[in-house]
Amino acid sequence: MSCVLAIDAGTTGVTAVVVDASGQVRARGYQEFAQHFPHPGWVEHAPEEIWQATLESVRAVLGQVDAAELTSIGITNQRETVLLWDRETLGSPRRAIVWQDRRTAEICVRLREQGHEPRVAELTGLRLDPYFSGTKLAWLAEHEPRTWALVEEGRYAVGTVDSYLVARMTRGLEHVTDVSNASRTLLYDLTTGDWSAELCALFGVPVDALPEIVPSWGEVATTDPRSFLGLSLPVAGIAGDQQAALFGQTCFDVGDAKCTYGTGSFILTNTGGELVRSDAGLLTTAAWRSPDGTDTFALEGAVFVTGAAVQWLRDGLQIIGSAAETEAIAATVDSSEGVVFVPALTGLGAPDWDPHARGTIHGLTRGTTRAHIVRATLEAIAFEVRDVLQTMHGTVPARTSLRVDGGACANDLLCQVQADQLGLEVQRPRLSETTALGAAFLAGLGTGVWSSTDDLRETWQLDRSFSPRGDRERADAEHARWREAVERSKGWALL
């Protein structure tokens, strides 16, 4: 049976899965890598650690399937993280700056005060925020001029995680990215479908340092077996993680929407060939590009910290042993008893967009227990998603359901709270790793494992549906209290 190897290079680790023609996962491997926090608000990854985690996760699946069954590779990745590497040695001169990193807040303020944001938004569909790659590259040019000089000389390549992995897999032969990743850099023009010389000049990035933009599926590179565990396979699918999840959820029609609960939460709605723009804190982004050059777009709400808040409960506060415990712990109390957690640990994303916001916990009393804090964390995730979907209302077609995926969707309590807050049916698929599945689907389309998106729809299977229940007035009151807490968290880092 023909199978596809999908690599999901996420924020905290790399997952490799092998997907067969029926859409079932035949093998799975995972390897975590280190998070580096050199200063408050800074987040970095070592590129070599990402690469070694990729090799380890793929090595794990090769121990479970016959490599001869693999037909192609699909790659999906954390999107706005930027890396530099030597084109000859493939070594990196510094750690990657991660999408969560907030160090460029002042650059954003400066560019905004200079009046650039309207033009940037017009070209990119994005906003001036530290989240996006362009501001990170501008910071490198300003603060690490010796390193940046080698970028300008052509020795160092600039790219996102997908382009770095392709470079490592091909021994530096290919420097490519797809439209979904390119559209998150602040350097890409949505209307022309290519890098913008105007934007590259604004952020000081040489166009020649950037990867070639290729379709999201179709053969674009071939792995070198000397570098990639003896495998010589076409790289036939590339997409940023959230667009890959939209594809993996088979949201191919206009108005189809999904929410991925990962390190952050990301809500995307397919808008087809139309560039739908928002003045209310949402992003217009490229979803994917077919081999014939046709672009599909999406409207996105990006919430920076959701699963990362649970990770913080585990590693920072140390009040849980694992994410899987949160449902049982939260279920020991009927409510959070007025405790509200705003997990603005790296600022606020959509729809508020405040890089100076910081996490806050309100409503603590002598009777507050860890169960209340854990429940408030799950509720915060649902509140954040509600904020985004309410903002989308009226901009895109009305929906009756929301498809969810990502690790936290296994939490029944979270899914039920989400349905209650939205007043919508929440649908969870049998396979929650839809980000990796989307990468597999793209690569399989690119190599003939599947002939059309209609074939892919047939593979989607429902695990469980959650219908709204409970008191609507109570849900609205809880959300109103949440919004009050959000307002109090804003601008905290400036005090």
Image (cartoon, grey):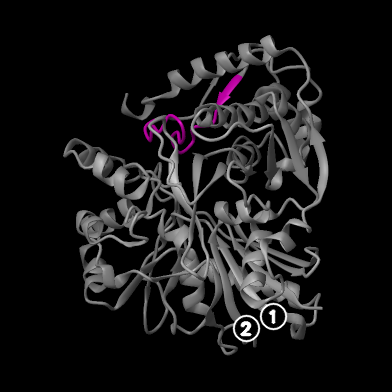
Q: Residue placed at 37% from the left, 44% from the top?
A: 126
Q: Which mark is residue 218?
A: none
Q: Which mark is residue 71?
A: 1
Residue 10 percent coordinates (x, y): 58, 57
Report the quarter where the N terminus lies.
bottom right
Name the image quarter holding residue 172: bottom left
Q: Give neighbour class at mark 2: few <14, some 14-19, many 20+ (Cα, 10 Å).
A: many
Q: Which residues are the magenta region?
A: 340-356
Work out whether mark 2 precedes mark 1 in sequence or the reverse, and give the earlier one: 1
Q: Residue placed at 69% from the left, 29% from the top?
A: 418
Identify whether 166 is placed above or below 173.
above
Query: For the residue marked with disc 2, what is the amino acid?
Result: Leu
Observer able to see residue 362:
no
Q: Nearer the viewer, residue 352 or 291?
A: 291
Q: Residue placed at 37% from the left, 45% from the top?
A: 125
Q: Nearer the viewer, residue 377 or 173?
A: 173
Residue 26 percent coordinates (x, y): 81, 68
Name the image quarter holding residue 386: top right
Q: Secondary structure at mark 2?
A: loop
Q: Nearer the viewer, residue 224 or 239?
A: 239
Q: Which residue is mark 2?
A: 233
Total numbered badges shown on the rendered structure: 2
Observer able to see residue 416:
yes
Query: Do the CB atoms of the residues marked 2 and 1 lie less than 8 Å apart?
Result: yes
Q: Is residue 349 magenta?
A: yes
Identify whether 305 is placed above or below 228.
above
Report the quarter where the C terminus lies.
top left
Q: Secondary structure at mark 1?
A: strand
Q: Residue placed at 76% from the left, 29% from the top?
A: 416
Tell me the CA gap for discs 2 and 1. Answer: 7 Å
